[in-house]
Image: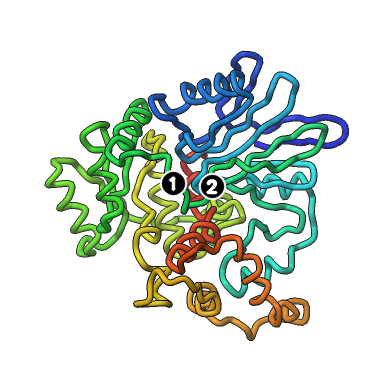
C-alpha cells in the first residue's frame, strides 16, 4: 500500500492490508499484531484504538508481533508504525509512504542513486542507517511512530527505550502462554532446525496451541534435519521436510525472486532461494503465521568474539568491531572516482553514527549494534507470507 501526502490531499491507495472501520477510525494492518489477553489481529487493533480514544496515547511497549499498521483518525490525521523488533518497515519518500520499496520507487520517480548506499552495498553487501539505494527514500525506525498532518510527515519517539531497557515481559513462561492465546485462531507453522532457538520456541508453545512443523533442506543426512526429525519424534509430531524446487523457467523465476526481494534483499544466493521456496510452500498450504527461533546472536557471543575473552569490559573497541564484523571482506579495488571519495572518511563517519548505540559495557554495545544495524533483514518473510 502507499500513502500520498502532497499539497492537494492525503490519500491511501493500492491497499493490500486488512481494513477495519471502528468509531470513526479507519485502520489498515498487515502481519501478526497482538497484546496480552487479546487475540491477534482485529481484537488487538480495536483495543489499541480504545486506548487511544481514552488517553490520546498508544502504549507501544505492550504491543507484540511482526506487523505494519496505519491508523486514520476522524480528522484525517494519519498515524503509522511497525513492530518494536525491526521485523517490518515502511519506506518514506518526499510525499509518499509505502510498505514496498519497488512501489514507492515507481511513485516517487526518483532517478538519483544514493552514492553512499551504493558504496556500502558494494563494500559490505548491505546498506546501513536507514538509507536505501535511492536518494530521498528512507526506512522507518522500529522505535519511532509517524504522524502525517497538514501534508507533512513527522517522526515521533515511541518511548520504548533500547534493548538494554527493562523488558515488558515479566515471566517467560507466562509470555508464551499469552502468545499462544493470541495466536489461537491462526494457522501456525514452525521451522524446526537443529539449533536450540527454534526448539525453545516449539517447546514453550507446543502444549498450548497447535503447531505444524517443517524443515527445509535437500540432504537428509544433514545434522539439522536429523535433529529436527528426532525432536519431532520425541514430541510425537509430524514434520515436513521441504526440498528446494528447481525452476523450470529460470528467467520467469528470477523476475519472481526480484519482486519477492522487493529491491532490498539480495536474491542471487542459495539462502534466499531456499527460504523463498519454503515460505511460498507454507503460504500456499494456508498457513498465516510463520514462527521460528532467530534471536541467537542476542544470547550468544557471535558479535562479541573480536574481544574474546574480555567480555563485559567498559571499553568498546570500535576499530576492531568495524574490521571484524562490518568490513569483513576488505573490498577496496572495485571503486571508481565517484565512490573512492568515500573510502578515506567512511570508517570515521561510521564510528560517529554508531555512538548512539554504544552502551556501558562492550558486550552490551555489540548486542545493541547488531540489533540496530542488522534490522530489516526479515522483510523477505513478510513479503512472501503476505503475497
Percent x, y for residue 348? 66, 76
Residue at 42% across, 72% down: 313
Percent x, y for residue 353? 65, 65
Q: Are the two marked residues, 2 and 1, in contact with CB atoms closer than 8 angstroms?
A: yes
Secondary structure under tag 2 reads loop
Q: How far is the residue under mark 2 from the one under mark 1?
A: 8 Å
Secondary structure under tag 1 reads loop
Q: Is residue 371 above or below residue 337?
A: above
Percent x, y for residue 262? 59, 51
- Which mark, residue 209? none
Number of residues whose C-alpha sits closer than 10 Å to that of mark 2, classed few (under 14), some (14–19) or many (20 or more)? few
**Colouring scheme applied when the structure was drawn:** rainbow
- 43 or 102, which is in the foreground? 43
- Which mark, residue 161? 2
Residue at 33% across, 28% down: 181
Where is the N terminus found, in terms of image quarters? top right
- 321 or 248, which is in the foreground? 321
- 351 or 146, which is in the foreground? 351
Marker count (numbered): 2
Dividing the picture into quadrants, the one containing residue 251 is: bottom right
> Which residue, as the protein is rendered here, is positioned at the far right?
7
In this figure, which residue is indicated by the disc labeled 1? 166
Closer to the chain start, of discs 2 and 1, is 2
Amino acid at each position: 500500500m502507499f500513502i500520498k501526502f502532497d499539497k492537494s490531499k492525503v490519500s491511501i491507495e493500492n491497499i493490500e492490508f486488512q481494513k477495519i472501520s471502528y468509531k470513526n477510525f479507519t485502520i489498515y494492518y498487515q502481519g501478526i499484531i497482538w497484546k496480552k489477553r487479546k487475540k491477534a489481529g482485529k481484537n488487538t487493533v480495536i483495543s489499541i484504538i480504545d486506548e487511544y480514544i481514552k488517553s490520546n496515547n498508544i502504549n507501544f511497549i505492550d504491543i507484540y508481533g511482526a506487523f505494519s499498521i496505519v491508523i486514520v483518525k476522524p480528522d484525517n490525521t494519519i498515524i503509522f508504525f511497525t513492530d518494536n523488533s525491526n521485523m517490518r518497515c515502511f519506506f518514506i519518500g518526499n510525499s509518499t509512504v509505502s510498505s514496498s520499496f519497488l512501489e514507492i520507487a515507481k511513485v516517487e520517480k526518483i532517478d538519483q542513486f544514493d552514492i553512499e548506499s551504493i558504496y556500502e552495498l558494494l563494500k559490505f553487501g548491505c546498506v546501513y542507517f536507514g538509507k536505501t539505494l535511492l536518494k530521498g527514500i528512507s526506512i522507518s525506525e522500529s522505535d519511532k511512530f509517524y504522524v502525517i498532518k497538514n501534508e507533512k510527515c513527522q517522526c515521533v519517539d515511541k518511548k520504548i527505550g533500547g534493548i538494554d531497557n527493562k523488558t515488558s515481559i515479566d515471566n517467560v513462561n507466562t509470555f508464551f502462554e499469552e502468545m499462544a492465546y493470541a495466536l489461537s485462531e491462526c494457522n501456525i507453522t514452525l521451522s524446526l532446525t537443529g539449533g536450540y532457538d527454534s526448539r525453545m520456541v516449539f517447546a514453550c508453545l507446543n502444549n498450548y496451541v497447535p503447531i505444524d512443523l517443517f524443515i527445509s533442506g535437500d540432504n537428509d543426512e544433514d545434522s539439522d534435519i536429523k535433529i529436527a526429525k528426532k525432536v519431532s519424534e520425541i514430541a510425537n509430531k509430524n514434520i515436513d521436510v521441504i526440498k528446494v524446487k528447481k525452476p523450470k523457467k529460470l528467467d520467469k523465476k528470477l523476475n519472481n525472486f526480484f519482486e519477492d526481494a522487493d529491491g532490498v534483499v539480495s536474491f542471487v544466493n542459495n539462502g534466499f532461494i531456499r527460504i523463498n521456496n519454503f515460505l511460498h510452500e507454507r503460504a500456499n498450504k494456508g498457513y498465516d503465521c510463520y514462527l521460528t527461533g532467530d534471536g541467537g546472536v542476542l544470547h550468544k557471543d557471535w558479535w562479541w568474539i573480536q574481544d574474546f575473552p574480555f567480555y563485559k569490559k567498559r571499553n568498546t573497541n570500535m576499530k576492531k568491531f568495524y574490521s571484524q564484523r562490518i568490513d569483513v571482506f576488505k573490498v577496496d579495488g572495485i571503486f571508481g572516482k565517484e565512490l573512492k571519495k568515500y573510502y578515506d572518511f567512511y570508517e570515521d563517519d561510521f564510528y560517529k553514527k554508531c555512538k548512539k548505540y554504544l552502551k556501558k559495557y562492550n558486550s552490551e554495545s555489540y548486542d545493541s549494534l547488531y540489533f540496530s544495524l542488522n534490522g530489516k533483514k526479515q522483510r523477505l518473510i513478510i513479503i512472501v507470507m503476505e503475497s
